[in-house]
Image (cartoon, rainbow, N blue to C red):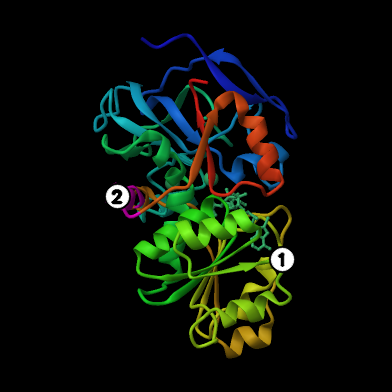
Amino acid sequence: NIPEKQWAQVIEKTGGPVEYKQIPVQKPGPDEVLVNIKFSGVCHTDLHAVNGDWPLPTKLPLVGGHEGAGIVVAKGDLVQDIEIGDHAGVKWINGSCLACDFCQQSDEPLCAKALLSGYTVDGSFQQYAIAKGAHVARIPKEIPLDAISPVLCAGITVYKGLKESGARPGQTVAIVGAGGGLGSLAQQYAKAMGLRTIAIDSGEEKKKMCLEELGSHAFIDFATSKNVVKDVQAATEDGLGPHAVILVAVNEKPFQQAAEYVRPRGTVICIGLPAGAYLRAPVFESVIKMITIKGSYVGNRKDTSEALEFYRRGLIKVPYKTVGLSELQKVYDLMHEGKIAGRYVLDTSK
Ligand code: 8ID
Ligand code: ZN
Ligand code: ZN
């Protein structure tokens, strides 16, 4: 029984506020599914969308959210390989053309026609969300929907970023922004991939989480360190710096620092998207250290199923707190202040 109305968090204009209200439930098109969202993680991207931080406009009015985990309750005639009652995830890539040069190579995040959940189409901050049948994440039924929701963006993205870094088991990766949603999962995926991690973030709560719960061997507090570059290098066994750096901070500064402490031959992976930020690296050191600097953008459908499989196998611990969908503004306020250790997950029934 699908209701006609549902609770949602909606912004009418860029800058907000988010408004908790009832809106109609939409019907899925022929190649789409309707997912009864049970839980949705809140990603910093959702806050960027509210604030209009990026040079890409959102749809308006907008229902944000792209870490939505729930149950398929309706589907279009063309959707054959997912059934009503199956568990599914509405992730950032809501759909893509499946035909362009990039889609053919399973680089669907690069598709010029990609639909973005909670950005160019309505997302998971509502009780019933629509996504293309080809793109919803298939969630095995034994996985709890609350715990898996942050994996649907944060998990997939950092897993992909770690693969893009080329770091191999036994090597060391610095996670910059380690105490946030992406950063906390990055430490877990890195550990599962046999990597050592150095966590960089700020404050006692995040330090404790990174060292005691997430398995990093060192924590560097960017706010109190006198020299982040030296401290990161000193935290590697031979003092030569980490083999890779995963940048998931929402601040420009570390994007201009990483090339200085990464190891010769090392790779800097840019994932975080601070507003108006630029990368900077000294040409001299970049050349003579043979550094690679790359961007990494979410993941494809295979990265998605692999990231979920890591969780299913018990390799990933997701540090999260659950509050009601109605409390989204509070989560944004905490996120804006950098006060969230791990992720907040919204329960759409409250
Ligand atoms: O596909 C992608 N590239 C992708 C996918 C998903 C998210 C990119 N993102 C982007 C988001 O849009 C956002 O810009 O990644 C960024 C991180 O998202 P998040 O993990 O959801 O944000 P958060 O939970 O607020 O964590 C950010 C952390 O960065 C720390 C903060 O303390 C916080 O814990 N941080 C900051 I701000 N400045 C720092 C610094 N100088 C820093 N950590 C280390 N050094
Ligand atoms: Zn996200
Ligand atoms: Zn395409």
Q: Point out the tag, 1 or 2, that comes first from the N-terminus.
A: 1
- Quarter residue 145 falls in: top left
310 magenta-colored:
yes
- Residue 197: x %, y % from top left: 47, 69
Task: Measure the C-alpha gap from mark 1 to mark 2.
Answer: 34 Å
Tell whether 53 sits left or right of 177: right
Instruction: Name the residue at 46% across, 56% down.
Output: 213
- Residue 348: x %, y % from top left: 49, 24
- Residue 250: x %, y % from top left: 66, 55
Q: Does the beta carbon at disc 1 come under 8 Å from ligand 1?
A: yes
The quadrant of the picture showing ligand 1 is bottom right
Disc marking residue 103:
none
Tell whether 152 sits left or right of 311: right
Where is mark 2, residue-wise?
309
The kind of secondary structure element at disc 2 is helix
Q: Are marks 1 and 2 in contact (CB under 8 Å)?
A: no
Say if 341 sits above or below 237 in the image: above
Between 201 and 159, the one lying in front of the other is 201
Say if 38 sits above or below 289 in the image: above
Where is mark 1, residue-wise?
253
Between 174 and 95, the one lying in front of the other is 174
Instruction: Name the residue at 48% across, 20% down.
Output: 349
Residue type, label 2: Glu
Residue type, label 1: Lys
186 magenta-colored:
no
Say if 167 sits above or below 303 in the image: below
Stretch of the chain drawn in magenta: 307-315
Most common secondary structure along the magenta stretch = helix
- Quarter residue 168 falls in: bottom left
Query: Mark 2, residues whose alpha carbon is within 10 Å: few (<14), some, or many (≥20)?
Result: some
Instruction: Name the residue at 50% across, 84% down.
Output: 265
Tell whether 342 sits left or right of 307: right
